[in-house]
Amino acid sequence: MAAPFQVNIVITAGVSYKQEFYLTQPDKAPWDITGCEFYANLSKYPRALDAVVSTAAEPVYERTPFITEVVSGVGGAYALSLAPAVSNTLREGKYVYSVVMKDVNGNYSEVLQGLAFVDIAFGAPTT
């Protein structure tokens, strides 16, 4: 697979987030992702450590996982989402995210990465 696509996204804290993405062949035909699995995480920077629980021997990374789903296997469509309770834990600012696909042969490849800009919904309930 080629280098991952770079797409910047905007997430509003405190509300649902869902966005679909499409994998295509060089001729723009959809890539069949039937049977593939996707994994995606969001963090303040690529190797953000959780300083409270990390040790030198066992680093623990501070990441927020996205919910992932294949929307249309033959159409090459997959989606990333966050529930309101999860997006509400995000502080306003700039984050990085990465999406890794596990194909039907068990091979992993990064298919998408980018910046995520988190803003606060003025009308959303605060905690």
Image (tube, grey):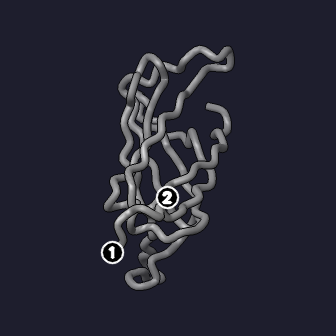
Q: Is residue 109 above or below residue 57?
A: above
- Rendered-image quadrant of the N terminus: top right
Q: What residue would you read off at disc 1? A: 127
- Which residue type carries mark 1? Thr
Q: Residue visible at 63% across and 40% down?
A: 4
Residue 13 lies left or right of residue 6; in this view the side is left
Which of these two is toward me, 10 or 106? 10
Q: Position of residue 26 (x, y in %)?
A: 68, 20
Q: Residue visible at 42% across and 76% down?
A: 58
Q: Are marks 2 and 1 in contact (CB under 8 Å)?
A: no
Q: How far apart are the alpha carbons under marks 2 and 1? A: 21 Å
Quadrant housing residue 126: bottom left
The crowding category of the residue bearing disc 2, from other C-alpha atoms within 10 Å (few below 14, some 14 to 19, many at least 20), is many
Q: Residue visible at 41% across and 35% down?
A: 106
Res. 9 mark: none
Which of these two is toward me, 28 or 57? 28
Q: Position of residue 19 (x, y in %)?
A: 47, 40
Q: What residue would you read off at disc 2? A: 42
Residue 114 lies left or right of residue 38; in this view the side is right
- At mark 1, the secondary structure is loop
- Rendered-image quadrant of the C terminus: bottom left
Q: Position of residue 39 (x, y in %)?
A: 42, 46
The crowding category of the residue bearing disc 1, from other C-alpha atoms within 10 Å (few below 14, some 14 to 19, many at least 20), is few
Q: Is residue 94 above or below residue 112?
A: below
Mark positioned earlier in the residue sequence (2 or 1)? 2
